[in-house]
Amino acid sequence: EQWRPDTILLDEQMPGMDGMQVLEALSENEELRHIPVILLSGMDDLNTVTEALEAGAVDFMAKPFNPAVLRARLSSSLERKALRDRERLLLHSLEKSYRDLQASENGRQALTDMIVHDLGNPLSIIKMNAELIAMTASAGTDIPTDALMQRIGHISAASGSMDTMIRSILDLSKMEAGLLEPATERVDVAALLTALHTRFEQMATDAQVVISLDVPSSCLVETD
């Protein structure tokens, strides 16, 4: 656990804790089970070899062993370990990429849902003002120019808001494709809030709701 060797030469016959018990302990440890183990044993019968491989050893050598053969077995074991390490790194990289993609998709879906939901507000304003104009005209009542222009202004502002939201969805697609360059600009918050107040004032009045606006005229912020 402290040294994390690249491979282990394990003697099957040891006092206290034998090689098979070590193999069992290694196989139960999530961090150590991937270390290749070559089991060395004075026993060369089929049962011992089978038991060692089933216990998790990647190779088996009977004692006494040939040093040249041992070096070859070690080289093969180290190559196997390096390959497994690369596979694990690749797996971790793929898992991270999947999590990042999933988070991006969740964020995209949440933003799209929010925009689609918010499209209902300007659509309601357009529908309400258009219906009021139509109802007044159908009743044969003359519509004062100021009142008509005000309602047309509400329709224009609401349609502009819808256009901005739709463009936001398109910009999101560009952003995901890496084609959108962010830009910053200073925004007059007072003007923005005044425009919002004007846009929703008629709807609030019809719903018998009073909207009051009180912001400094010079209020400025910088946004992305």
Image: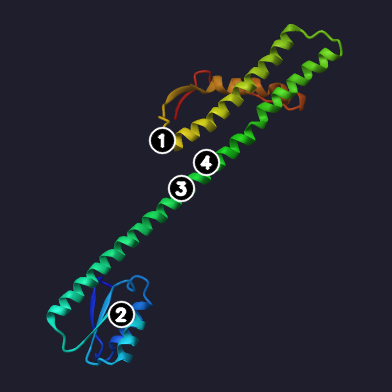
- Whether residue 214 can be seen here: no
Label 1 secondary element:
loop
Residue contact between numbered discs 2 and 4, judged by CB atoms under 8 Å? no
50 relative to 151 in the view: left or right: left
Side (left or right) of 218 relative to 23: right
Report crowding for label 3: few under 14, some 14 to 19, many 20 or more residues within 10 A (C-alpha).
few
- The residue tagged 2 is 57
Q: Is residue 77 left or right of residue 213?
A: left
Where is residue 203? Give x, y as percent.
72, 25
Q: Residue at x 69, y 13 (%)?
A: 150
Q: Are there few (<14), some (14-19), or many (20+) residues within 10 Å of tag 2?
A: many
If you read the primary sequence from the N terminus, does the residue marked by circle 1 or circle 4 appear first? 4
Q: CA distance from mark 2 to mark 1?
A: 48 Å
Residue 111 at what x, y percent from top left? Answer: 55, 39
Q: Amino acid at mark 2?
A: Ala
SS under mark 3: helix
Mark 1–mark 4 distance (CA, rounded to whole Å): 14 Å
Q: Quadrant of residue 134?
A: top right
Q: Which residue is mark 3?
A: 101
Question: In the rendered image, which quarter is residue 205 located in?
Answer: top right
Q: Say if residue 167 shows up in the picture.
A: yes
Calculate the distance from the C-alpha at mark 2 to the C-alpha at mark 4.
48 Å
In 3D space, how far apart are the residues under numbered discs 3 and 4 (Cα atoms)?
10 Å
Mark 1 highlights which residue? 178
Q: Earlier in the sequence, mark 3 or mark 4?
A: 3
